[in-house]
Amino acid sequence: MTATPDIQQSRGSGRLGLLIGLPVLVAVIGGGWAIWRATADLDDIEARALSWDQVAALTWQHVVITVICAVLVVAIAVPLGVLLTRPGTRRLGGPVVAVANIGQAAPAIGLLVLLAMWLGFEPSTTIIGLTLYAILPVLQNTIAGLSGVDRQLVEAARGMGMSKSAVLLRVELPLAIPVIMAGVRTALVLLVGTATFATFVNAGGLGQLITTGITLFRYPVLVSGALLVALLALLVDWAGRVLELLARPKGL
């Protein structure tokens, strides 16, 4: 069953509203926080923790961790998902996804601490731990997207003389891109949230503001850290939606 023009138009309007509304919402809330920060009566500890240079440095660390992990997740999960949808290895899809489910079922902080005890308290430990933690949504969506491609289209492409690799690159992946990108967007938001734990293994990030606020009972610092992480998650979600829209083949 195909969607009616009214439903398609409604979906398009909803996507457009999110694409416009999310950055506006982030700008309004972020601007309100900046005005509060510039006018708030903070003690010395709060002022140092929320200095513009400190906030900018921690935000940059958070973004770098998120981007590196996201690139690694896509580089691992998409090829693995493609491999697990090929006829010769399709039977391995269930066990591999089950292992990925076990990895994500473990608490992120526990996974990071265990890895840190093994590999050391370094930024690279955070990269490894968060990458393993965020693989599942991209892997699942890659498998689901490729499995959902109409087999008749694949057979028709093969009948036209296209090679298996050409069918994958020109037929299957373009049709599966919307589903894959939805998984990438989910992984991005997941990474922004779990990257707050990077501070526990000496990797920095906005989680440092949250732990400082809790440890020193400085609630302005605690709330600021949580708010900045939430705003960053909204921005990353918006960026994921933009990428999803740009990668979507025309006509879908």
Image (cartoon, helix red, strand yellow):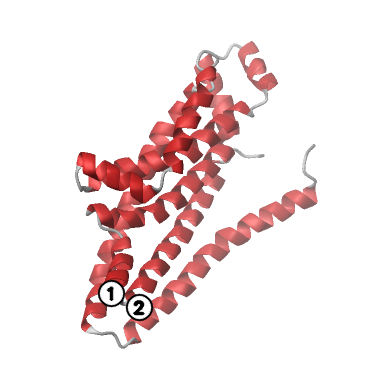
Which x, y percent locates residue 93? 52, 24
**What is the crowding at mark 2: few (fewer than 14 residues within 10 Å), some, or many (at least 20)?**
some
Which x, y percent locates residue 133? 40, 42
In this figure, which residue is indicated by the disc labeled 1?
A: 50
Left or right of 198: which side holds 120? left
User: Which type of secondary structure does the marked residue at label 2 adopt?
Assistant: helix
**69 w.r.t. 26: above or below:** above
Q: Which mark is residue 29?
A: none
Res. 44 in view: yes
Left or right of 13: which side holds 75? left
Which x, y percent locates residue 23? 50, 64
Instruction: Check the picture and name the quadrant holding the C terminus.
Output: top right
- In the rendered structure, which amino acid carries the disc numbered 2? Pro
Which of discs 2 and 1 lies nearer the camera? The answer is: 2
Measuring 64% from the left and 29% from the top, which residue is drawn there?
Answer: 148
Q: Is there a contact, CB below 8 Å, between mark 2 and mark 1?
A: yes
Measuring 76% from the left and 50% from the top, which residue is drawn there?
Answer: 7
Nearest the viewer among 68 and 223 is 223
Q: Which mark is residue 220?
A: 2
Q: Which mark sits nearer the N-terminus, 2 or 1?
A: 1
Which x, y percent locates residue 205? 29, 59
Report which quarter residue 130 is drawn in. Answer: top left
